[in-house]
Image (cartoon, rainbow, N blue to C red):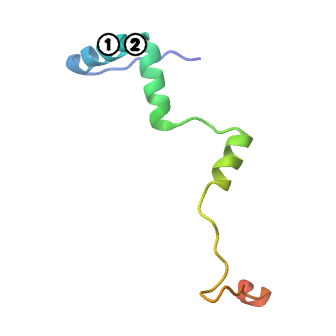
Amino acid sequence: MKNVTVTMDDAVLQRARVAAARDGKSLSKFIAETVEVRVGRPLNQLEALEQFLAGPLLLLTDENGKAPSRDDLYD
């Protein structure tokens, strides 16, 4: 884990300290978790698969419920 220096307005820092205290966290932990929420974290293989499967379905049938032929798919 790396240390970083962050520069922010005094008023923002004060609000961050209050929010961290309200959550029962150190300011460092609070900022780290806030950044992680904003930029996300890498998904493991199972999470990625679940996210993919939860996505929208790929509808291949036309309005009559007929699936396209192989040739139609490759055109």
Q: Which mark is residue 50?
A: none
Please give the name of the residue rendered at 43% of the width and 9% of the height, measured from the top-left corner: 26
Residue 54 placed where, x, y %?
63, 54
> Is 12 placed left or right of 63 in the picture?
left
User: Which residue does the numbered mark 2 point to in the structure image?
Assistant: 27
Q: Which residue is drawn at 71% across and 49% down?
A: 49
- SS for tag 2? helix
Disc 1 element: helix
Residue found 44% across the figure and 14% down from its top: 28
Question: What is the quadrant of residue 9 in the picture?
Answer: top left
For the residue pair 64 and 6, the one nearer the viewer reads as: 64
Q: What residue type is labelled 2?
A: Leu
Tell me residue 72's x, y (percent): 72, 89
Which quadrant of the structure image shows residue 7?
top left
Q: How crowded is mark 1: few (under 14 residues within 10 Å), some or many (20 or more)?
A: some
Q: Residue at x 28, y 21 (%)?
A: 8
- Is 22 located above or below residue 42 in the figure? above
Please, is residue 49 above or below residue 27 in the view?
A: below
On the image, which quarter does residue 45 sit in?
top right
State the quadrant of the C terminus. Answer: bottom right
Q: Name the outermost residue toward the left.
A: 11
Circle 1 residue: 17
Image coordinates of residue 35 in percent, x first then y, are 45, 29
- Quadrant where the image shows the N terminus: top right
The first of marks 2 and 1 along the sequence is 1
Q: Give above or below for 54 relative to 68.
A: above
Q: Which amino acid does label 1 sit on?
A: Arg
Give the Cα distance between marks 2 and 1. 6 Å
